[in-house]
Image (spheres, grey):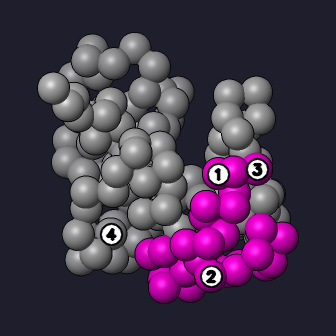
Amino acid sequence: MTTTPRGIRNNNPGNIDRTSERWQGMAADQSGDPRFVVFSAPVWGLRALAKVLLSYQRKYGLNTPAKIIGRWAPPSENDTGAYARQVARALGVGVDDVVDLQDPCTLSKIVPAIVQHENGQQPYPADLIDQAVRLALE
């Protein structure tokens, strides 16, 4: 029997940790998961993923797959090198190449790559990813 990954069940395919942050589209009932945010619909979790990535670039100057994933998935919990290589491949760049997440096309490529790595699957159609990216860039 196959179970749905936690990130997909929570409409939080980036597995964003719960903090004091109040996300747009956050489900009113957060009791279903003690660690991760639960969103009311996938678009809101995808938007939040994109917003976090944008903040990494805007606030911290993280502009390569290695730097972005190094913060997203720290080595204490992940094989960060493998994760960064997978994301770089999805973007068609090297792990140390500079990327511009303000570019909707780039953001629309990195979001599903992270979803795939976090969940072992990427079930969302391109138009939903694009919608979430547009919302994040507003």
Q: Which residue is mark 4?
A: 129
The residue positioned 45% from the left and 19% from the top of the image is 35
Residue 85 lies, with reference to residue 13, above or below; the image says below
- Tell me if label 3 and label 1 are in contact, CB under 8 Å: yes
Q: Nearer the viewer, mark 4 or mark 3?
A: 3
Q: Which kind of residue does numbered mark 1 sit on? A: Tyr
Q: Which residue is mark 3?
A: 81
Sequence-first disc among 2 and 4: 2
Q: Which kind of residue does numbered mark 3 sit on? A: Gly
Identify the image quadrant of residue 85. Answer: bottom right
**Helix, strand or loop under label 4:** helix
What whole-number distance in Å separates the C-alpha atoms at marks 1 and 2?
Answer: 14 Å
Q: Is residue 121 magenta?
A: no
What whole-number distance in Å separates the C-alpha atoms at marks 3 and 2?
Answer: 16 Å
Q: Which residue is mark 2?
A: 92
The residue carrying pointer 2 sits among few (fewer than 14), some (14 to 19) or many (20 or more) residues within 10 Å by Cα, namely: few
Sequence-first disc among 1 and 2: 1
- Tell me if label 4 and label 3 are in contact, CB under 8 Å: no
Question: Could you say which is closer to the camera, residue 54 or residue 23?
Answer: 54
Q: Nearer the viewer, mark 4 or mark 1?
A: 1
Residue 99 lies, with reference to residue 31, above or below; the image says below
Query: In this rendering, would 2 be left or right of 122?
Result: left
Sequence-first disc among 4 and 1: 1
